[in-house]
Image (tube, rainbow, N blue to C red):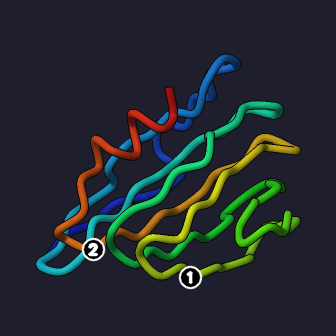
């Protein structure tokens, strides 16, 4: 059994997103991304499918030539190889689900 709380230790950085692994299971890695209003994650992609959930706040999510406004409660799933970018419109808490085979270091590098 693994347990975590997405709200524990929330500290935003005004300069860049803060990435932390909440927990790992046999098949996923659950990652929290804290984005202060105005911070961005440049266009990036992964080889594996992902699921992004906006737990708090509002972000602009660029994908497939569109910019989507995702608010609290929104979920989006992407196949591997799909480029996307994020910008926080409000302070945002984001949950990212990665496959076990994906590297969290890739997410940390994208955050700056």
Residue at point 50%, 26% (across, down): 112
- Circle 2 packing at 10 Å, graded few (<14), some (14-19), many (20+), is some
Residue ID for mark 2? 99
Between 51 and 78, the residue placed more toward the observer is: 78
Residue at point 47%, 38% (across, down): 110
- Circle 1 packing at 10 Å, graded few (<14), some (14-19), many (20+), is few
Check disc 2 and report its element: helix, strand or loop.
Answer: strand
Numbered label tally = 2
Residue at point 73%, 58% (across, down): 56
Q: Position of residue 8 (x, y in %)?
A: 47, 45
Mark before the other along the chain sequence, 1 or 2: 1
Q: Position of residue 65 (x, y in %)?
A: 80, 67
Residue ID for mark 1? 77
Mark 1 near mark 2, Cβ–Cβ under 8 Å? no
Q: Quadrant of the N terminus?
A: bottom left
Residue at point 63%, 28% (across, down): 12
CA distance for labels 1 and 2: 12 Å
- Asked if residue 5 lies left or right of residue 102, the reply is right
Between 86 and 21, the residue placed more toward the observer is: 86
Toward which corner of the image does residue 99 lie, by quadrant? bottom left
Check disc 1 and report its element: helix, strand or loop.
Answer: strand
Q: Position of residue 50 (x, y in %)?
A: 44, 74
Between 77 and 91, the residue placed more toward the observer is: 77
Q: Is residue 9 above or below residue 74?
A: above
């Amino acid at each position: 059994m693994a347990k975590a709380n997405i709200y524990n230790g929330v500290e935003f950085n005004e300069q860049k997103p803060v990435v932390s692994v909440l927990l790992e299971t046999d098949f996923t890695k659950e990652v929290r991304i804290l984005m202060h209003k105005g911070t961005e994650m440049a266009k990036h992609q992964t080889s594996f499918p992902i699921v992004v959930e906006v737990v708090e706040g509002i972000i602009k999510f660029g994908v497939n030539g569109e910019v989507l406004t995702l608010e609290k409660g929104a979920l989006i799933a992407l196949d591997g190889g799909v480029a996307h970018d994020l910008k926080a419109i409000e302070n945002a808490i984001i949950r990212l689900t990665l496959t076990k085979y994906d590297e969290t270091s890739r997410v940390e590098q994208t955050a700056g």
